[in-house]
Image: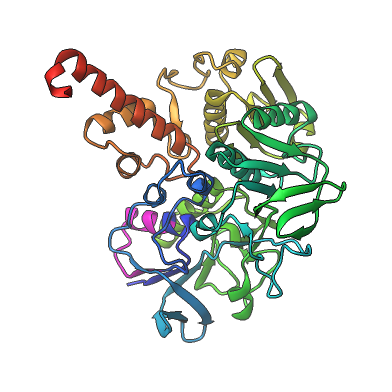
Amino acid sequence: MNDVVIIGNGPAAHRLAERLRHHGHEAGLTLLGEEPEPAYHRTLLPHYAAGSLARASLHLPPVPGARVHLGTVVTAIDRERQRVYAYRHGVETVHRYDTLVLATGARPDVPDVPGLREPGGGPAPGVTTLRTTADCDRMNGGSVVVLGGEPLGVEAASALAARGNGVTLVCPGAHPLHDRVDDVCGGMLTARLEAAGVTVLGAATAVRRTPGHLELSDGTTLSADTVVLCAGVTPDTRLARAAGLDVGAGIVVDDRLRTSDPSIHALGDCAQFDGQTLIGISGAHEQADTLARILTGRPAVHRRVPRILRVRSRAADLSCIGSPADFDRPGTRQITLTDRTRLRYARVAVRDEHVTAAVLFGVPQAIATIGMLHRSDRRLPGDLLGLLLDLPPRPASDSAGASADPVVCLCNHVTRQRLHRAWQDGARTVPALASGTRATTGCGGCGQAVEELCGQWARGTRDLVEETCPALSS
């Protein structure tokens, strides 16, 4: 018997527990979560903050047979005795392990700006990060300033504007995601955000906050009942460092996701492999899938995860695959599509008919298809232009055929037809569809689409009842 203890209860820890059970792990499985509620999609927090998703809709389905200790703060790891010490409701608890997994995630950065930070380092009153549901619950007032031009900042600003707040997004670069997209795509992203009610201020940083106001480096003073910090994160390595494990920018792991102690593994935002920390929930899920196979005795090794950024908002649908440097590597050709009228943009780097990097904006089906082709290392279809324009793609030369059934959940390759079959079988809510198909349990980016499909199919059923059986609708 090999008892596994996981420190953490976020999406990566939950995925690992789920896949361990899937692969037949029958021994003890314990998760120690610091938050007082079950595991949930962190990527959907902006939608919860905006009120478009209920709290329960964030929750991930329970893992059969797993012991989950909520509200548990881990204080120390005794590597010699293989014990984890923690406090829950003021009482010390001890957890024995054969294998320990650190899924401690990352801590949001709080800039050292007067008025933003408490003396202890946390956010000041009226200031919040966006890492937990409790952070969302602290957002009050009508005017909101979001600091940070990365995906989380864009998503938060878009969602809060949809709630009716006056929202300003302050970016350190000329436009959001300035280090990942060029001026053309950045301009389209800005236009979409401003059309959605977000004021975008580029090339600016915060210099001082006073109650109700935020001063910027360009001399502007903004009304700010709430300041939302989306200015980056730092891997949480505190427990690992205190336990004497090798730590760099993150907890150093090898290709079996082992730390310098072979009984301890790490994954997700806290881990560092091959000199690189992780970006994105899809990469964390790949690590969880790999580690689950390793811990259940299956042949598997971890390889560097491709960098994929995804912006999920009503205002913009944007995906960045690879890094800017990948566009200029030898033997790479580039295909670019710019549609300024409809605000669509695609830049794809191709080598040997395989996608090596891409920036895709406003082309949702192309985002799903190219992402799938990249992840599975398959050749591009012959009709690349049709793919980028969201026309039905032709089959790739090495595929068995193309499907007219669009992929809704890219992470788990769940198609619209599969979702509809599950809906017809009785899964009439987003959590029910997640449990039955695993849609939305990856990066969470398809949550809005799945919710809209539920509403669409429910309306269609009601319309059919009213048309065929008017008495039932009265």
Query: Which region of the structure is painted magenta?
Result: 16-31
Q: Residue at x 67, y 23 (%)?
A: 346
- Where residue 399 appears, x then y in whole percent? 47, 22
Does the magenta-highlighted stretch encompass residue 324?
no
Q: Nearer the viewer, residue 105 or 378?
A: 105
Location of residue 266 (image quadrant): bottom right
* Relative horizontal placement of residue 42, taking residue 342 as reference (left or right): left
* Relative horizontal placement of residue 420, taking residue 128 as reference (left or right): left
Residue 276 against residue 353 in the figure, above or below: below
Residue 408 against residue 290 in the figure, above or below: above
Extreme residue toward the right, this view: 218
* Relative horizontal placement of residue 23, taking residue 467 as reference (left or right): right
Q: Nearer the viewer, residue 312 or 158?
A: 158
Q: Residue at x 16, y 23 (%)?
A: 474
Residue 408 against residue 89 in the figure, above or below: above
Location of residue 455 (image quadrant): top left
- Where residue 40 appears, x then y in whole percent? 43, 54
- Where residue 247 appears, x then y in whole percent? 67, 70
- Where residue 450 appears, x then y in whole percent? 40, 34
Does the magenta-highlighted stretch encompass residue 19?
yes
Residue 466 visible within the image? yes
The colour scheme used here is rainbow
Q: Quadrant of the N terminus?
A: bottom left
Q: Residue at x 32, y 70 (%)?
A: 28
Residue 308 visible within the image? no
Location of residue 294 (image quadrant): bottom left
Numbered circles on residues, count: 0
